[in-house]
Image (tube, rainbow, N blue to C red):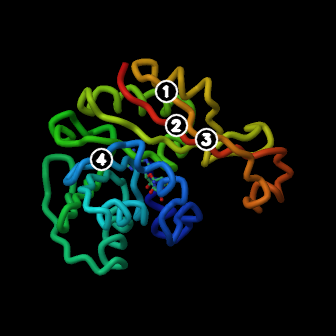
Amino acid sequence: MTDWIVRWQEGKIGWHKNQPNSRLIEFIDCLKLSVNACVFVPLCGKSMDMLYFLEKGFKVLGVELSELAAEQFFVENKLDFTIRKSDKFMIFSAKNIDIYCGDYFDLDAQILSQVDAVYDRAALIALPADLRVKYAQHLGAIIPSDCRLLLLTLNYPQVQIDGPPFAVNQAEVVRLFKQFECQQLQCFDDIQNEPKFQNAGVNFLEKAVYFLCRI
Ligand SMILES: C[S@@+](CC[C@H](N)C(=O)[O-])C[C@H]1O[C@@H](n2cnc3c(N)ncnc32)[C@H](O)[C@@H]1O
């Protein structure tokens, strides 16, 4: 966990994008969010996808280890924010958004009781295999039963380069989220747009989008 904190301190945040994710824009309607719906963004960093949800009129609840990330999200997007302390978290809040600073694994069902959907971009794939199992189990335990999920993953030959981001294929998604119906909405090879992987000689880099809802 300290690795992530250090990455934020050193500004080594190559995953961060300055615009919302194009696949979120393409597939957001699958989540069937009603006005005022609340979206949980695990391992949220300072993702501009959160701003996209806010601009669409939705509420956001994020969780992020790094306080620096949370602070940068509010400052860079010129959102007035407050900070309060709870048992295990520092909670950064502005209108319609709370970012819980602390460990995802300390979240509980009560904190997420108002959540309608989950948006996972670069959260599951940020974790090594053993933690991915824990992550999925914990998610299933803390989100309300009617919650929908939009999950973005990467898959590539893991032997050719180390993560993070880690390779996660469709079989693993199905296995991890056994209690969910899992629909793959999109999958394409995008190696030509990923110089880091291309330069490392990686053969392919699939980007996939999944929609999950509880069986
Ligand atoms: C690869 S980044 C993705 C951030 C964001 N989802 C995005 O798309 O920009 C993963 C983030 O997860 C955070 N993180 C890692 N482990 C965590 C944990 N156990 N609890 C909360 N946040 C965590 C890291 O600090 C980092 O900001």
> Is residue 108 rendered to the left or right of residue 154?
left
Q: Identity of the amino acid at label 4?
A: Leu
The label on residue 182 is 1
Q: Few, some or many C-alpha atoms within 10 Å of disc 2 (few <14, some 14-19, many ≥20)? A: many
Residue at image coords 53%, 67%: 17
Q: Earlier in the sequence, mark 3 or mark 4?
A: 4
Q: Which residue is mark 2?
A: 210
For image coordinates 82% across by 47% down, the residue present is: 202
Q: Tell me how far mark 3 sits from mark 4, CA to CA.
A: 20 Å
Q: Is residue 191 above or below residue 204?
A: below
Identify the residue at image location x=29%, y=81%: 78
**Amino acid type assigned to the residue bearing label 3 in the image:** Gln
Q: What mark, if any, has residue 186 been given in the picture?
A: 3
Residue 3 appears in the figure: no
Of marks 3 and 2, which one's residue comes earlier in the chain?
3
Q: CA distance from mark 1 to mark 4?
A: 18 Å
Real-space Cα separation, disc 3 to disc 2, in angstroms? 7 Å
